[in-house]
Image (cartoon, helix red, strand yellow):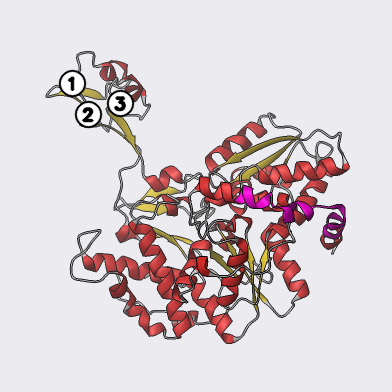
Amino acid sequence: MRGVYSSITDIRRKIFTEIARMAYNGNYHDLEEIPYKIIPGEIGTYRGSVFLERAIVGERLRLAMGLPLRPIDQHAPLTTGVSESIVAEKYYEPPLINIIKFACHACPDNQVTVTNACQGCLARSCKEVCPKNAISIVDGKSVIDQEKCIKCGLCMKACSYDAIIKLQRPCAKACGMDAIKTDANGHADIDYEKCVSCGMCLVNCPFGAISDKGQIFQLITSIKKGDKVIAAVAPAFVGQFGPKVTPEKLKGAMRQLGFADVVEVAVGADLCTLDEAEDFLEKVPAKQPFMATSCCPAWSVMAKKLFPEFKPYISMALTPMVLTARMIKKDHPDCKVVFVGPCAAKKLEASRKSVRSDVDFVLTFEEIMGMFEAKNIHLDQLVEQDPFTQATAAGRGFAVSGGVAQAVVDCIHKTHPDREVKVHAEESLQNCRKMLKDAKAGKYDGYLLEGMACPGGCVAGAGTLQSIVRSTTAVNKFKNTSEAKNAADSEYADRLHELLEK
């Protein structure tokens, strides 16, 4: 759960910090010792076995370096394959999202069960409403025969004490693609043909058994090598590092990490807005019944996987990440670009052959925090530097659900004030799938459809540090600053059009 500092959060932060510290020190042999540093002592704290806890930390360390999980049934040192990863450029090797099998708790999945709250009532409504006679009374309490149960939920609704519940794997419940199943050992298993790497399983697993791969080590290697690395920060960055860390302080802190410059991805969001506005005006309804936004990679990949007939209806606009990266490399051809954001799916997007030359690294806010910790940079004590002034309020609003569609509508109304633009926005892949089913039935003809894979928008991404409510408030406050409002003048819009044409 985002915004709650749990033991899982603590271990994740320590892993990112230690990987960053190892990269800065330049000694990858320290990798074998790090599990003992993160899990000290002789007695396990979380799982009863200190050896199991260290083994899990070891696999998470490997993933944080972009390495694959080791085979459980084969001996392999923790450093296996590390030498090949000590490079300043390394793309993610699939799969991006991984389940550490021996960390999985083998949670019961899709099971309706009677809890101890059953009062053995006289009515026995649960038994009466069951269409399969799956409920019997044993020692005065209701018992469900799992072989007969069809999970219809009628017994749950009938119970006056709410004593009947449905158990689901937290990771499977959070997956909007139904990509998580159960393997032969009862552990969670990912169907990568369905997975879109949104990362919602990662943040909803209460046992910390799911993790994505990282590029912290490779990024720091690039900086140490002397590469000119420019950071492009996603609009959701505001407030992620604490209420005292203003955007101006964050810019200074990232320069201390070795970044040559820091640029708002909201500038690319402005370009995306213009492109999608033009697409909508040209194509809806003349050439297609509706248009869907394209900036959330998990949403657009989901739409293409499950509704291939809608592929032409998804905007062809490049995502803000790619547009910003191309702008940066146009001005600095010799640089490398790191996208810093909330999203696990952006890592997958950056690994595409068509994007690799634009975006060299992708790190989450959580991973960047590990770099700050490794360098002992105290963010709230920094002096504010030059502010971000290039992006508009509309571009900064991309981080919040509904922000993309609102930006496109406002852009259309500047040139076509009388044009009605009907909008429907959904967040979470479950709701996005329902929206596309309704679109298939003709419910959204003439609409602009916005989809966001994470509940709340990008502020709820798998790599965020703060609660969704707090992050949303911070983004809305920042986008309404005078700098953002002043940037939205006609001269700036003309410049965006010029950049878009190039």
| Residue 282 lies in the magenta-colored region | no
Q: Residues within 10 Å of mark 3 (few under 14, many from 20)?
A: some
The CA span between labels 3 and 2 is 8 Å
User: Is residue 286 rendered to the left or right of residue 316?
Assistant: right
Could you tell me which residue is drawn at 43 percent across and 80 percent down? 22
- For the residues bearing labels 3 and 2, Cβ distance under 8 angstroms: yes
Could you tell me which residue is drawn at 84 percent across and 35 percent down? 419
Residue at label 2? Answer: 117
Residue at label 1? Answer: 120
Mark 3 or mark 1: whose residue is earlier in sequence: 1
- For the residues bearing labels 3 and 1, Cβ distance under 8 angstroms: no
In terms of secondary structure, where does tag 3 sit?
loop
Instruction: Say which mark, if any, is on residue 15.
Output: none
| Residue 480 lies in the magenta-colored region | yes
Residue stretch rendered in magenta on the structure:
475-496
Residue at label 3? Answer: 162
Q: Residues within 10 Å of mark 2 (few under 14, many from 20)?
A: few
